[in-house]
Image (spheres, rainbow, N blue to C red):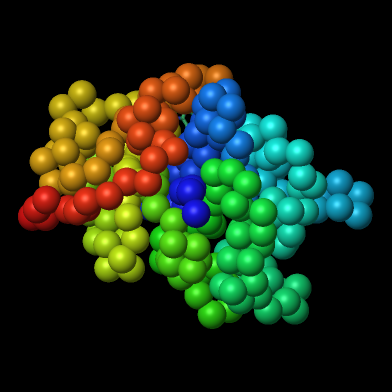
Amino acid sequence: MQGVFITGTSTEIGKTFIGVAIATALTKRDIKVIPRKPIESGCTRNDAELIPQDAAALKQAASYQGPLSEVCPYRFEPPVSPVRAAHLADKILTTEQLAGICMEGSEQGFLLVEGAGGFYSPLAKDGLNADLAVALQLPVLLVADDRLGALSQVLLNVEAIKMRGLPLAGVVLNQLDTDQNDHMDNSADLRERLDCPLFTMPYSKQGVATEADALIDALMLPCKPKGPHIRAVG
Ligand SMILES: Nc1ncnc2c1ncn2[C@@H]1O[C@H](COP(=O)(O)OP(=O)(O)OP(=O)(O)O)[C@@H](O)[C@H]1O
Ligand SMILES: [Mg+2]
């Protein structure tokens, strides 16, 4: 199965922003993208329907012809973790169910899955984001805020991804604001310690990634990355 599982060092870190950029760039190159955000909380209400914003953005970026319910069947209104939101709605969801949603029709293209929260955030009653990534056996793309403190967050996440036996598709250092520390160079510091594609996504005033083509080239998508993740840590 070809694809990528997008996770982040935290919530609100740019997973959807990067997912939209990847889906847009791949679609532009005539690669069919199958977007999946199997469970989304914090959905907005439109009359009787709950609208999953992330799933809708990914569907649009991928020009996906299927219904939004295929991209995201499990939607919840409270802006809390998906597991808590499901619990509040008296729903029990399993990793197997979420994996099934992701895999349905995935052989037809490049499967782009966005988790919720971070790699170790609970996603189902019986599993974390990490467990869904393992069930899908997808390379993991890690999105981190390009700020002071990112090095430890990235290396911890990379170690966790490695421990789960998953390939690391790459790390995106996402500049979530314009306020960058001139003396900081997370990319150079990570390059010394990681053996994987690294990309710095600049802040975009328009909220739309201008570097989508450069991003998929740097990540060598849609190729499946191989090789060791960590050269040295410490
Ligand atoms: N490089 C960037 N430049 C400008 N705005 C950005 C950038 N990256 C992300 N954003 C903005 O930051 C906010 C959070 O990003 P996004 O929704 O992609 O995070 P997320 O990790 O998907 O969040 P969630 O955990 O809720 O799914 C959004 O408003 C998004 O447009
Ligand atoms: Mg998101």
Q: Position of residue 172 (x, y in %)?
A: 35, 38
Point out residue 190 in the picture as x, y percentages from the top left corner.
18, 41
The residue depicted at 20 percent of the width and 24 percent of the height is 182
- Give residue 144's quadrant in the image: top left
Most foreground residue, 21 or 179: 21
The quarter of the displayed image where residue 192 is located: top left
| 27 relative position to 67: left or right | left
Q: Is residue 13 above or below residue 98?
A: above
Q: Residue at x 67, y 46 (%)?
A: 55
Residue 110 location, quadrant:
top right
Q: Is residue 146 visible?
A: no
Query: Where, quadrant-wise, is the C terminus in this rendering?
Result: bottom left
In the image, residue 123 sits, relative to residue 36, either above or below, namely below
Write the residue at 77% across / 53% down: 69
Q: Nearer the viewer, residue 135 or 76?
A: 135
Q: Judge whether residue 203 can be spotted in this image.
A: yes
Is residue 99 shown left or right of residue 92?
left
Q: Nearer the viewer, residue 217 or 41?
A: 217
Residue located at (44% from left, 23% from top): 213
